Image (spheres, rainbow, N blue to C red):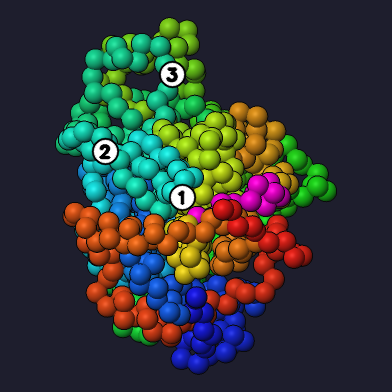
Amino acid sequence: MLGAADRAPARGLSAEQLQRIASFCAGEPVGAEYIPLIVNESDFDRTDPRRFVWEHQPLEALAAFHVTIIGAGLGGVCMAIRLGQAGIPYTIFEKNDGIGGTWWENDYPDLRVDVPNLFYSYSFAPNTEWTNYYSRRDELQSYVERCADEHGVTEHVRLAHEVLAATYDPETARWNVRVQPANGEPYSVETNAVVSAVGMLNRPSMPDLPDLDTFAGPKFHSSRWPTGLDVTGRRVAVIGTGATAVQLVPGIVGRVEHLTVFQRARHWVMPNPIYLQQVTDAERWLMKHVPYYGAWFRFLMFWNNSDRFYGAFRRDPEWTAPDVSISATNDKLRVIMTEYLRRSVDDEELVNRLLPDYPPLGKRILQDGGWFAALRRDNVDLVVEPIERIAPNGVVTRGGVTHEADVLVLATGFHARKFLWPIEITGLGERLHDRWGDSPRAYLGITVPGFPNLFCLYGPNTNPVVGSVVFMLECQVDYVIRCLARLIDDGYAAMDCREDVHDEYNALVDAELEQTVWRHPRVHSYYNSDDGRVVTNAPWRLIDYWRMTCQPDPRDYDFVPARADAVASKAEANAREAGIPPSREPGAAEAAASPTAGAGARACEGDRAPRRPGAEGARSGKLVS
């Protein structure tokens, strides 16, 4: 079914030679286990080794199959590109008026990515024109749109169409998806599979503050920054000091009359000398014209922002200062960031207000792009007293003190733990949100027992502890494509994750997470459910998750055979469906038919680390009639 031919990458270099080059580039030893992953990530010869390849393309079965993707952000676009390359029909429903996901929704001043964009981009779509190492919002938005256009995705997207519900019908082994257009009546579509690409940080969390509605001026969540709003010469109040505020505050502080920042939680802030730095013309020239320079640069960004820091998240049971750090490596980070705070602020009272009392990495580390400098300005106040209520003319804190403001910005985060919310997902007699409650779980973060052919991108416990979410999305898309290919090629209607496999995997997840900083008694964040369980973050190294998602194991699933009459009738219906063009890029059919197309170093076979439940012994999934 799959083409996974081994071919020496980078014009015949051996794995040993690549390891030597990687170690030289990194300035430290790079383990041999990383070489296959590096080849996939850096794609030295631009062969796209992750691209799915049919050994024999099942045209009739493909015509009868259809996938519905919810969301047109980085995950949804990546999924669509891979479906198009495989010739699998699909439609994307996007609730917003444009493609881009979080980069379309968020547009506050000085918004930029906090992961190097050479790594925060698709492995198969390198960009040699980045203007910054950490690019601004507009450039990232343009990148997503360009990728969608170049791969023929845009014509499959139904903008301003919000998915309200999806219900699985066991009689037909298909999903009924209820859609609400912005202008029109809701309608339903049938589909073989549903891929959720709704993201994690897309539903704003509004603070529960008394009299919030009484504020007289502009009032909004930071992710809904009004187009054309001018804060010049105005008094602005910002509630929150997290990842949004540390970008937003430096972005407006030079224009406002006065800025009042209300701190709800303290955060560790890391010095980063290249955070605001532009990529030089010489650097861009090298990436364009020197063979492999861009690929090795991507590797360097990958290496410096990934598994080499994994140990800092892990608890050392022998560590002697467990209140403030969890290991020697973690404590080094604490010292570095504490010293940086003191150098940057040089005000003991302000230092005491800002210095966290929990170990580093317990919450997301923030990048300093002028945050500390902004807080030192004469027109800025940092308020740590609790907010009592909102008044028409400002914010009232404990003791009845009113902090006057003309504009109120709520940088108060998102409902990160409410995966797929508020969509009503109903599987085999059970609602997904009833099953999950406050503690969502999924096998590999992707599939859930009792919800056949439902696949989650960026699902529970897949937020990367190190590295880039784009890497995780590509791993998940890879896995989903191969699940769908097995259904199509082997004549199955549906696949349902086995409960025992799901439970064993999540027991392993929980056991690993118990050893991390997020279970420290002083750590409280959106990572955790109400009972303290970590529900968003993955406990794995990137290489571990890559191995686990390289190839679906059929023993992990129960399969439902397809009916021949249903296949034939659906093929005819798909051909008649109005407004949905054939989901195939120019030349994709020819490429997919080639046994060598996309061949590369997809060398993740053999032992997977950690070994997945169900991988040992002779267990196998069953057929469900």
Q: Nearer the viewer, mark 1 or mark 2?
A: 1
Q: Label 3, label 2: how many angstroms apart (C-alpha)?
A: 34 Å
Q: Nearer the viewer, mark 3 or mark 2?
A: 2
Q: Which mark is residue 187?
A: 2
Secondary structure beneath dot 2 equals strand
Name which of mark 3 and mark 2 comes first in the sequence: 2
Q: Which residue is mark 3?
A: 208
Where does the image place residue 243, in percent across and percent down from the top left? 44, 41
Where does the image place residue 581, in percent across and percent down from the top left? 22, 61
- The magenta span reads 494-504
Residue type (three-letter) at the residue carrying disc 2 = Tyr
Q: Going 48% across and 52% down the picture, which residue do you hit? A: 453
Q: Going 45% across and 65% down the picture, which residue do you hit? A: 488
For residue 458, above or below residue 597 = above
Secondary structure beneath dot 3 equals loop
Q: Which residue is mark 1?
A: 173
Q: Going 48% across and 11% down the picture, which residue do you hit? A: 398
Residue 290 on the magenta span = no
Evaluate whether residue 540 shows in this view.
Answer: yes
Circle 3 Cα neighbour tier, 10 Å, few/some/many (<14 / 14–19 / ≥20): few
